[in-house]
Amino acid sequence: MSVEPDEPVMPEVRDDAPEPGAQAAHQPHFEEERGGAGVPDDFQRLWTPHRMAYIKGEGKPSGAGSGDGCPFCEIPEMTDEDGLIVARGERVYAVLNLYPYNSGHLMIVPFRHVADYADLDPAEYEELAKLTRRSLTALRKASGAQGFNVGMNLGHVAGAGIAAHLHQHVVPRWGGDTNFMPVVGRTKVLPQLLRDTRQILADAWPEHD
């Protein structure tokens, strides 16, 4: 049985309705409300002062030695909560990246201060592989990750931010997670605080392979 569609309802036209765009133009910006110099525009500002530490290079070691302020050597001395450690093995640990590409961006790091993958001893690279595999399991369970970028940047010329201490990245990926924000705006929008992410992944971390 077919039903004839209703007549389309035309929107009511009001004489006092503002012109398109007029309402937005008359809404004061926060900068205007507090005073200051500048010309208002249509852009919204996403203030991220915590990123200044990354821009200034704070937290990076002053040299190549383990005693030169290497964060990967200092993190294991912290509590799991303060160091954002998700899991600890005998020779390797998993920690959240402080500047993640996506929520759940992990790094698998040997406790020993070593720069090159070829310099790992057999027990270290075996456990590094084991924790990498467990990280994939935890991320799938906790966040339904659809794919991963897994790998290392060895050496400054290869893009390693802290080249003196080897670390393997595990980045969860989802369809549509790359959009205009990171591509054009160079901004990542992260829907979850790092401490919350750490706890969720720690709870999802498998005890055995």
Image: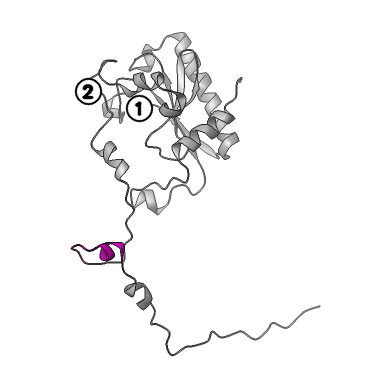
Q: Position of residue 171 (x, y in %)?
A: 46, 35
What residue sits 50% from the left and 24% below the top?
A: 132
**Residue 127 lies in the magenta-colored region:** no
Q: Earlier in the sequence, mark 2 or mark 1?
A: 2
Q: In the image shown, does 40 or 117 lie closer to the viewer?
A: 40
Is-magenta flag for residue 40?
yes
**Boundaries of the magenta span:** 28-42
As drawn, the residue found furthest toward the right would be 1
Asked whether, in this view, residue 31 is left or right of residue 129, the answer is: left
Name which residue type carries label 1.
Answer: Asn
For image coordinates 53% across by 38% down, the residue present is 147
Instruction: Name the residue nearer the viewer: 205 or 178.
Output: 205
- The label shown at residue 62 is 2
Closer mark to the observer between disc 2 and disc 1 = 2
User: In the depicted view, which residue is nearer to us: 107 or 198?
Assistant: 198
- In the orientation shown, which residue stands out farthest toward the bottom? 15
Number of numbered markers: 2
Residue wearing tag 1: 153
